[in-house]
Amino acid sequence: MRWITSKRVIGIIAIAMSLFQIYTAGIQQLPAMQQRSIHLGFGLILVFLLLPLQKTFRSRHTGTALAIDYVLVFLSAFISLYVLLEYENIASREGSPNILDCIVGTTAIVLVTEATRRIMGLTMCVLVLLSLAYVAFGKYLPSMFAHSGYSFERVVSHMFLSTEGILGVALSVSATVIIIFLIFGAFLEQTGGTHAFTNIGYGIFGRFRGGAAKAAVLGSCLFGMMTGSQTANVAAVGTLTIPLMIRSGYKPIMAAAIEALSSTGGMLVPPVMGAAAFIIPEIIGGSYLDVMRAALVPGLLFYMTVFTFIQIQGKKLGLVKAPKSELPKIRSLLSQYGHLFFPLLVIFYLLIVENVSTKKAGFWAIIALLAISLLRKATRMSFSKLILALENGPKTALIVIMSCAAAGIIEGVINLTGLGLRFTEILLYVAGGNKIVLLLLTMVASVIIGLPLPPVTAYLILAILAAPALVQSGIHPMAAHLFIFHFGVLGNITPPSAPCSFAAAGIARTDPLKTTNLAFLISAPTFIVPFLFVYSPEIMLKGSVVYVIYRIFTAFVAIGGISMSFLGFATSKLTLPERLLVLCASICLIPHNIVLNMLGLLTIAAILLWRNIRSRMSRGSSYPVESKS
């Protein structure tokens, strides 16, 4: 049974999954349950092969562990094929499952739970088990949380043999859209796009103070926009950017924190947004383009905070520009790799002009990338690179697949028992009709749920529990869902648990907890951004052009001002009264009030002007004065 750990077998299965996903994205998609079950089956098989029981439990009984893995792989294939072949019969028996249906449903729940434990750890696994325990014993709870009770047959049928549980909306998006963009990202990496994007960023910003860190931000942003994975972003780009920042004068802890923040920001900027960009339209309606338009400026506001920190730290540390001889030549890089931007233009053209489906846009982007990469020797993929891209695409998607499947169980429980409605009522009751209190409560819930979970999983849970309360209070659905998503993402860089910061700290060889704390402090000003969704919908590009531009300008000034206040530095060190003045002035830029906005802008401008004058005077007074005698 040693074949079960064979890299060749794993590679063949991963390639088969990629080919299936590409075919169904661009040529012929299967009916919903069949498509999702095959997608899940491939994901389960790869998890059990790549993360064998012996590795996760460190068992000494190698033969027994391999036998268990062999059984799990067989069962994963069986439940997938069962739905594929029995699809019509299952639909006709809806609500009245037979014995084999119940066995298959139970097996699927067990497999998803175990695969979740292996790839995501115990936290998500415990949440799944708690949700199942709630279905089983919830009828004995106090009336506020109790449900009427459900039969075993109904529960397992609802959880797997319907589109309300494991095979629900989340897995639907994973099986049709997310996977195709992750495969596209794998192809882009094999063409050298990741390395090229980082070097282009360094070539652009290296000539400025703190250029290495700014290059890291741009490279991580570009890579994260495509992959939608924070930790993968750190692993792929951080190995290049963190040593570069350390060599340019940044302390290891600071370099790690900047990379963690840069990778996190990639989740907030379209087009992928950690998969949420594809899921939000499925939940609230509208289109993928609506999400891209609404999320663009808020994502840039996040990076505004990071750039402000880099600029201020560059001045504090007295960093100098990188020598011109060390900078990558942008013209040469664009000549060799510039054509790799063409597939991105293909995506936007197909979505905006041709109005094709997102999955088909991803399909044609892959085709365009394969064709355009042939134009240059540096980007041309050999057969081995092509095979490697087909292998790596599904492997990077495994955590997303299991996140969506596990979230499907939790979502199924919430929908079946009506817990979501009760949670919404509780939030509204505690808030007492006060919108700001409701937003603060939702912020706390979102950050806490986002602490241990990947962004897509946190969002899926929050979309059922918290978003309805915001919508019922009169907040626009898009603003409500982006609000919870943004805070769910920030939960991933909030102490004490922050996998992204931990991964960056490992590369920088520095303290992970201190790195997490520093990343959180740097990102603190961005906690104001989700509130702008609610109180300034113009940053979602809604409203008249003139007022949209005005509100975007005030939002950027507000974020920059809050960052300066927190860091205590502008053109020079700020005194405590000046920091408080800048903070208050920045807050004045948030509400819809022209008088307050003008007061805030004038205050910040006056303080910056005064600091600049003081700085020039101090430099002038330090010059030696010649004696007239």
Image (tube, rainbow, N blue to C red):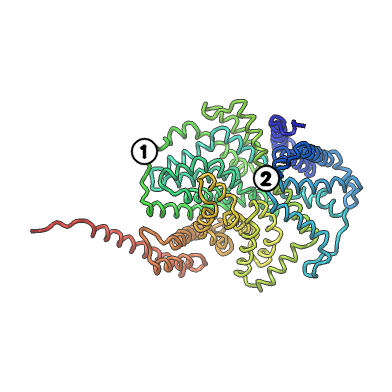
List x then y, in percent, for residue 257. Answer: 50, 51
Instruction: Check contact, mark 2 vs mark 1: CB within 8 A.
Output: no
Q: Is residue 351 above or below residue 442?
A: above
Left or right of 188 on screen, residue 556: left
List x then y, in percent, for residue 530. Answer: 57, 60
**Screen quadrant of the N terminus:** top right
Mark number displayed over residue 324: 1
At label 1, counting other C-alpha atoms closer than 10 Å, the crowd grade (few under 14, some 14-19, many 20 or more) is few
Could you tell me the amino acid type at mark 1? Lys
Mark number displayed over residue 373: none
Circle 1 SS class:
helix
In front of the other: 145 or 583: 145
In front of the other: 311 or 601: 311
In front of the other: 613 or 556: 613
Residue tagged 2: 399
Q: Which residue shows up at 45% across the image and 47% down it?
A: 214
List x then y, in percent, for residue 10. Answer: 71, 33
User: Which callout, 2 or 1, points to the residue nearer the camera?
Assistant: 2
